[in-house]
Amino acid sequence: MPKESFDNSNRRPKNASTVFSRDFVGAITTIGSSDILSDCEFAIRVITKTWLNSPGDPLIEEALTRPSVVEAMLEVLFSSTNDEILELIISILAELIGRNGAIKQIILNSDPQLEIFVRLLRSASLFLKAAILLYLSQPKAKQMLSSEWVPLILRVLEFGDKLQTLFTVQCSPQVAAFYVLDQLLTGFDEDKNLENARQVLSLGGLTLLMTRIEGEVHERNNAAMIISCCIRAEGSCRNFLADNINKTSLLELIVVGSKQNSSGYALSVLAELLYLDRYALVTYLSTFSFSWSEMLRGLKFHTRGTKTLNFLKGLKDGWGGINVMHVFFIYLEKAPPEERPIVAVILLLLDLMVILFHSTYFMEILVMDNGLSSVNFIIF
């Protein structure tokens, strides 16, 4: 890069006092023209020192955000095996993206198959920081074609429970992991989405996802969304989920999420877990033409000891004595129209656990006010 492009003081903003050092100009020139990796690595150190010593300087930022300079740093990022240099480049690029959104497009155009990121995610020491830069770059599913993506990103999810700091940028690797998982499980055609979801399951991802149901609300919703994708890909995983998922955390997520209009995925997971004995229920219900009270009495007897009933019992007992039916009844009153049938079914199934063989107050309101005059709703 011509030295004159940095030394032209006529282009300098009035509030900028920068006079580019000879070392900085030489470093920019080196990474753009030298084929000697060690020289380029030294140049990265010089560039980093200048960047950190001149925080917010518009001319330094302008020099580093030029496409040719970003591309040159990416070449070093791909070629170097020095973790110190790699971390410096990752950190500089993360800050530049925060200051100039165009940088992420330069990165994605320069590395359309994300080969640099796959290489960095394999690293034993830098994979969490690399995940942050990946997230900040916002790639799409069409760029994630490597078969390594699912195992690499599950490792980020497993070990990324602490904030990573890239100079002034702080971000959770788990946020990055959920972004990539969302792309991998929803960003392709249906067959590829399901294939990726099955790979998540085969690698033990479901256990990881269940533990994330107990974290921060946004993270918990992301976990519920990915779990929903896994259930669609392999319905048999419902049994494992029903036995092992933290029912208290799932309930909390539904309630807390409802206040933030973000409980849909958790509710979807819960509905799927009530789907465990659907074929038995279908067979049983198809024989009925009796009254509501007779059908419910028989259904209570029929479901005693089934997986669905065991799950419901855990759901009902899993929130420290709080009246779960009351919680869902309050939720029902505020639920959007598309969620009301699901919530109503959950309440009706919970009502089956009542010892007395007669309808409760909840039952009467649900049947009359929510369009559930047919028993077919129980099979979803």
Image (cartoon, helix red, strand yellow):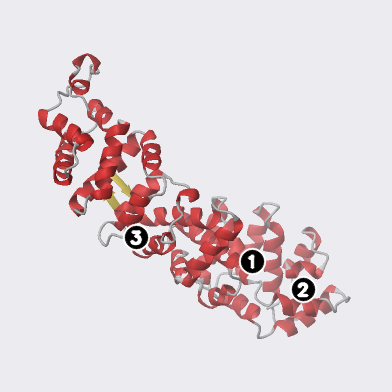
Dot 1: element: helix
**19 over 323 or under it: above or below:** above
Contact between marks 1 and 3 (CB within 8 A): the answer is no
Q: Which of the two discs, 3 and 2, labels the residue nearer the N terminus?
A: 3
For marks 2 and 1, give the CA distance: 22 Å
- Choose between 208 and 68: the one closer to the eye: 68
Between label 2 and label 1, give the one nearer the viewer.
1
Can you give x and y, in whole percent of width and height, for residue 361 in the image?
A: 74, 68
Residue 5 % position (x, y): 22, 22
* Furthest-right residue in this view: 289
Q: Residues within 10 Å of mark 2 (few under 14, many from 20)?
A: some
Q: Could you classify mark 3 by the number of other residues whose Cα lies within 10 Å: few (under 14), some (14-19), or many (20 or more)? A: many
Q: Which circle, 1 or 3, is nearer the viewer? A: 3
Q: Quadrant of residue 100?
A: top left
Vertical side of 293 occupied by 66: above or below: above
Which disc, if any, is residue 160? 3
Residue at left offset 49%, top offset 53%: 183
Callout 1 amino acid: Ala
Residue 303 shown left or right of residue 209 in the figure: right
Residue ranking furthest to the top = 10
Where does the N terminus fall, quadrant-wise? top left
Q: Which mark is residue 271?
A: 1
- Work out which residue is located at the far front of the displayed protein and give it: 35
8 left or right of 291 in image:
left
The span from disc 3 to disc 2 (Cα, nearest Å) is: 48 Å
Q: Name the residue at 71% across, 70% down.
A: 348
- The circle on residue 64 is none
Residue 216, compared with residue 275, is above or below; it is above
Q: Amino acid at mark 2?
A: Ser
